[in-house]
Every structure is written in structure tokens, then in C-alpha cells.
Image (cartoon, rainbow, N blue to C red):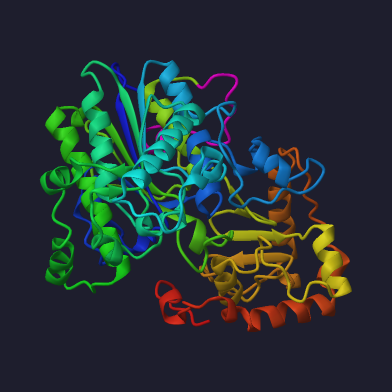
Amino acid sequence: MVARPPNIVCIISDDTDFERLGCYGGAAVTPRMDQIAAQGVRFTQAYCTSAACTPSRFSYLTGVYAGRCTDDLFMADNPPDQPYRVTWNTALNESIPSLGHVLRANGYRTGYVGKWHTGHGLDSLGGDVLKPEDDPGDTDADERLRAVQAAAVAAVKRAGGFDFAGAIMWGNPDQFPVRALQYHNLEWMTQQACEFLDSCATDEPFMLYVAATVRHGPSHIDSLEQDVGHTQGGWVESLPRFASTHLPPRATIYERLAMAGVPVNDFNVGLTWLDDQVGAILDKLAVLGVADNTLIIYCTDHNTEPGKATCYDRGIRIPWLMAWPGVIEADTVCEAGVQNIDFVPTVLDACGITPPDTMPLDGTSIFPVLYGGVERIHEDMYFEFGYTRAVRTDRWKYIALRYPADLIAGMQDGSLTEAPNHINQRLQDQASIAAVYYPSYFDPDQLFDLAADPVEQRNLAGDPAYADVLAMMQARLQAYLATFDHPFDLAVPPFMRSPEYRALADATRATGTDHIPWYNPDHIGLTFGVDV
């Protein structure tokens, strides 16, 4: 789009409710993210295609729906003749075209920092040498941490097409094998991001992709109390000094929240800590003198409960901010619908790069809605997770839940005593919360009038007055389904219309909170104000 290719810096947070951010009208103390919005554009109708870490991150890096994954992990879980089940199984490998590969092939220096979560288990990198009781201060444990980190760095470089990788957290911090290191360390990620920026020549365009671990668990408040020098990659001698120079002291987070009159809770602490990381990266770009030709993009992988791990709007609607001095008009608000599959084509468009024939894209550049006189780039949008598929227009939303034959047989013969959630993982907290929150969670066909019912509480699919709308939305969904190799039949299995299934579903919803030890209806209803 410009004579000299721009630099690209993308920051992807985790599990972030966009309505809490200051630039979206929330109370959170997020001045540096608000700065990006003030200097550029804030999207109000941005969505991820799959509301969970792994499939969403897969789409961010590839520009395609998670259901198009061809990695062995996904294919083993989903035989070609069966409907696929999108969960945390959409791994990225070097044979799958991704943004890093394309940018590097076109003269960009590429860097990746932070959470990966688009690969196989940590044991595939030799992570089984790490033990829960390991002491990070022990020399032997430190050597093993460094070895596993080196393997993770090499895997990210290879799979994603990155010249540089650092501070790699293979999954969520609380899933790391060493208990003493199951916490967030944004200073470590920020240090590695700045190290990458320092390594870039002034005449060489670069792309930095930073995947923060917040606002996901574990506790941010507990994490702030940990030793900044101890990381999942071993002891980093220079990190305490770097942190004290480049980020506000951790303790000041509480002070800033108190001064703003914002409750000091884990949500708000995490968001302000994230904002400090964003600010340190922005400041580094300014010090290096490259900020004026850098496109900044901030997004998140997905929203939070009760919509996480579903196709409901509460899980799929996300923040999206962009700033590019001299190109994107400051303080712009865009209401056009965009999705995370649009991230790759948007970046390539900004860089003046045509995607190779080997990289078919589901998304499209968002720049036409900013400068091309185009009101929308999507007439409708497609979503998928678990055994559900969905399509959304400005007003209508249709979700189809179709269980595979083996689960239906299990419910019929009594071997399954509960109706399976959308991913068939009984103890998955997010799914249990959604099953309680959404009255039609187990309905095979779900139709919502988003203008009248934005929180998707009243299913209109069985109302004859909306039969034509239902048929129209099913046709829209079928058009997307026809583009996938795996089948997905919109015909409802007879058992899913039976009284026996309805009784099983109702009983499962009634006992849903038994699986959620930290379940809090007041917290879940905070944004939408809907009681469960």
C-alpha cells in the first residue's frame, strides 16, 4: 500500500473481554491500548472464527478456518469421512502455509514471542524431562529448562517460518510441567520482543508477532509476586534489570488501579499488566525511530466465558485495534464485520505482497472498508467449534449442533448419562458454563434475532413465524460447509428431536454447575446482565 514496505507489529492477548478495555468504554486502566485506538482505528464488530486458543491462533497465522487444518494431530482426531471436531487439535507445521513463511520469502525479518499453543504436546519436544517438583534455582533443572526452551524455539521457527523466536510458552502457563513456573512473565516476553527489534536492520522491514499469555489463567495477582528472573526457559540474569528499566514496577499496577477508582481484581490487574507490555513495545519502536512506518495491530484470540468454546457471540466477538501513522486515519471507528481469518490477508495487503498460489485464504483484506468505499467485506460470517457450525449476518445467527453417530448411540443405549457438550469433554469448565448460561445450548437448530436478543437467550428455530429466516440461514451455512472436505449434514438426527434427548439435555443443564468449582453467576452475567 506504500512505496516502502511497512514494519508489522501484532500483539495478540488471551481470553480478553473487549468491553473491559478503556477504548471500548470499559473501566480497565489500559492507556497504551487506548493510544493505539486513538491513533488509528477501533473495530466494533470483530470476531474470531473459533472461540478457543489453538484454533483461533491457527487462523491468525494461516488466514483459513481451523477446519482446514491438515496436521496429523487434527487428521487423526477427524477421519475424512466424518464431521471434524474443532478443539485444541489444530496444530501448525511447516507444510501448512503461514504468514511467517510468506513474509520471510518476501524480504521480511520475522519474529515470534510468547504463547504458541498451536503444536503437539510439550512431550514432543522432550518436555517429559521436566518434573512438577523441579526447583528452578537448581542447576540441573535450569539446564533441562533451557534444553526444552531451545527445542520449543526451534519448533516455532520451523513451523511458523520465523527467523527469531523467544520466550516461548508452549501452552498455558498453568499447564507447564514445573509447578514453580506456572505463572505469567510478561517481562520475559517483552525483553525478547525488544531483543528481536534491536536485531532488525533499519533498512529491513520486519514483522513481530507477540502472543501474550494474559488474560488467561493462572492468577495474575499471584504471578506478580514471582521472581521475574525465573522463566520457563531457565534463569535470565539480565531480566530483572531490563524489567525495571522498560516496564513500570509491578507494584504500581495496584496503585494505578486505585487512583483510577477501578476494583483491584485479577481481571483488571491482568489487563493493566498487559497494557504495560504493549506500552514497552510501543516505546521501543519510538526509540528505534521506526514507529512512523510500523503498522500496529492489537487483537485477542477469543472472548471469555460464558461464550468461550462455543459459537455464541460472547465467545467469538473480540477487540481489534490498528494504527499506522499517515495511512490509517486517527480516532476512526469501523463497524464493518471482520474476522481473524482477515488478519493474514490484511497484513499481506499492507506489505504489498500477493499470497502465493499455495496459500489459499478464507479471509480478505480489511483495508477496502477503510479506504475503498466498501461498506462491508463479508455478507455473512462463518464460525465453528466442536460439533457446532454457525453463520451470522448483521441481524441473524444460526447455530447447528450435530452429534456423531457414536455419541447418539451412547445416549440411546444409556452408556452416556449426560448429553455431551459441544466438544465432548465432560470436565471442560468453559463448556459447562455455556451449557448453563445458554438455554438452547443442546438444541440441534438455534436461531437468534441479534437485534432483539444480543445475548442469544431465545431460540426462534422452532417458531413457524421464522421458518423462512431459518431456511435462509441454513442455506448460507450450507454454502460454507460445501467448501470443506469433511461432511457435515444439516439434517437433524431423529434422536436429537426426541423427548428422551430433551430430558437428557435438561438434566445435564440442571447439574452443570457441579463441574465448575469456581462457577460464579454474578461474574458471568457481568457484561450482559442476564441471570443464569
Q: How many marks?
A: 0
Residue 447 percent coordinates (x, y) = 66, 65
Regarding residue 40, the answer to whether it shows in the image is no
Region in magenta: 355-372
Query: Residue 65 vs residue 337: left or right?
Result: right
Vertical position of residue 44 compared to residue 420: above or below: above
| Magenta region includes residue 18 | no
Q: Quadrant of the N terminus?
A: top left
Query: Residue 526 vs residue 475: left or right?
Result: left
Query: Residue 504 vs residue 530: left or right?
Result: right
| Magenta region includes residue 360 | yes
When asked about the image quadrant of residue 429, the answer is: bottom right
Residue 83 percent coordinates (x, y) = 76, 49
Q: Residue at x 51, y 30 (%)?
A: 159
Regarding residue 29, the answer to whether it shows in the image is yes
Q: Residue at x 65, y 38 (%)?
A: 68
Which residue is at the front of the view, 531 or 521? 521
Query: Residue 281 vs residue 144: left or right?
Result: left
Q: Residue at x 63, y 76 (%)?
A: 439
Label the magenta part by its dominant secondary structure: loop
When asked about the image quadrant of residue 405, the answer is: bottom right
Vertical position of residue 242 compared to residue 6: above or below: below
When asked about the image quadrant of residue 428, the answer is: bottom right
Residue 387 percent coordinates (x, y) = 70, 57
